[in-house]
Amino acid sequence: MDYKKAGVDIEAGYRSVELMKEHVKKTMREEVLGGLGGFSGAFSLGKIKEMEDPVLLSGTDGCGTKVKLAMVMDKHDTIGIDAVAMCVNDIACAGGEPLFFLDYIACGKNYPEKIAEIVKGVAEGCIQSDAALIGGETAEHPGLMPEDDYDLAGFAVGVCDRKDMITGENLKDGDVLIGMASTGVHSNGFSLVRKVFEITKESLDTYYDELGKTLGEALLAPTRIYVKALKNIKNAGVTVKACSHITGGGFYENIPRMLIEGTHAVVEKDSYPVPPIFKLLAEKGDIAEQMMYNTFNMGLGMIVAVDPADVEKTMAAIKESGDAPYVVGHIKAGEKGVTLC
C-alpha cells in the first residue's frame, strides 16, 4: 500500500505546480520575495512605510456553487477570476489596494491540466487587480469528494492609509449614488439559479435570443473586478464617502452596510439597464421582484456615494477604467436603510 493507492497522487501534485508556474509568474510584483514552492509566501512591506498610518485589510471568499457550472461545462479557466474578485472587491470597497492573494483548491482527484486551468483564472484575476499570487494549496480529498469535483476559495491582503479608508462617516443628505455595471450574476445566488435552471450540459448549451449567447456563457461570465475603477476615482481627487460591494443579499442587505445612522439610500430601479439574465431568471423561476433585489446584484456590482460636485469627475474616472457608471440614486436623511423606487 502507498499514498497513491490511497487516492493521493503526489506526482500529479508536482506536475500541477509545474503547469501553473507560467501563470503565477505573470502576477509578480516587485515586493514579492522568493519564488513558488516555498512553505510560505513572502511579501515586502517596505513601501508601506511611506504611509502615515498604514492599515492592513483582508478578505476571504469562494465562488459558491458557481463551481458546479464550471464542472458541468468543463470550463475551468475563468472561475479563478471569481475567487479573486470576491476578495479584492471587498478590499477595494474599503479604500484599500490589494497586495497579494492565496488560493485553496480542494478536489476529489488532482488532474494537473484542470488545476492549471483553474490557477490560470486565479492569475488573471490577480493581474486585473494588480495583486501578486504568492501561494496556494491544492488538496486531494479521495473518498470525501467525487473525483471530478472541486471547490475553490481564496484569501487576499491589501493596505491603505487610515485617512483614505472609506468608512461612510461623512455621508450626508444630498450625496449622489453612482453604480458600476456588473457582468451578470457574478458569484452570488447560484443556489437559487440552480433551482430555476436545470444544470446539465444540454441546458447550459441552450442559446437564448434575449441573452445573445448560451445560458452557460451568461451564467459563467466572471465577476467584474472594480479595483482599477476605485483607484481611478481616488487618483481623480475624488473622495468616495461610502461604498458597497453588491454581493450575497443583493441591494437590501449590502447597501445599508455603507450607511451611517441617520442616512437612507434611495435607488431608482430604472436609472440603469438590468442585464437580461436577471429578467430571464425572474420569468423562468417566477421570482418576486423584491426577492430578486434581495438575492442578486441586478446589474450593479459596486455602488459609491460622492458629493454632488464630484459626480462628473467620478463618472469620467470609472469610464476610463473600462467600467460603465450610472447615477442611480441619492442619500437622504432618515432611518438607516434603502428604498427602491
Image (cartoon, helix red, strand yellow):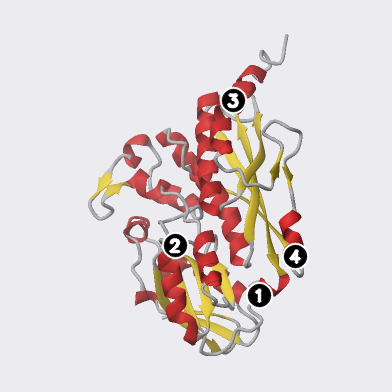
Circle nearer the N terminus (3, 4):
3
Residue at mark 4: 54
Residue at mark 1: 167
Assess disc 1: are there few (<14), some (14-19) or many (≥20) residues with their C-alpha within 10 Å of its C-alpha.
some
Q: Given the image, on which type of amino acid does mark 1 rest? A: Thr
Q: Is residue 198 above or below residue 283?
A: above
Residue at mark 3: 18
Circle nearer the N terminus (3, 1):
3
Q: Nearer the viewer, residue 38 or 72?
A: 38
Q: Given the image, on which type of amino acid does mark 4 rest? A: Pro
* Residue 107 percent coordinates (x, y): 60, 31
Q: Secondary structure at mark 4?
A: strand
Assess disc 4: are there few (<14), some (14-19) or many (≥20) residues with their C-alpha within 10 Å of its C-alpha.
some
Q: Nearer the viewer, residue 331 or 224?
A: 224
Q: Is residue 298 visible?
A: no
Camera-side mark, 3 or 1 = 3
Circle nearer the N terminus (1, 2):
1
Q: Given the image, on which type of amino acid does mark 3 rest? A: Glu
Q: CA distance from mark 3 to mark 4?
A: 36 Å
Circle nearer the N terminus (4, 2):
4
Q: Quadrant of the N terminus?
A: top right
Residue at mark 2: 321
Q: Given the image, on which type of amino acid does mark 2 rest? A: Ser
Q: Is residue 143 above or below residue 242?
A: above
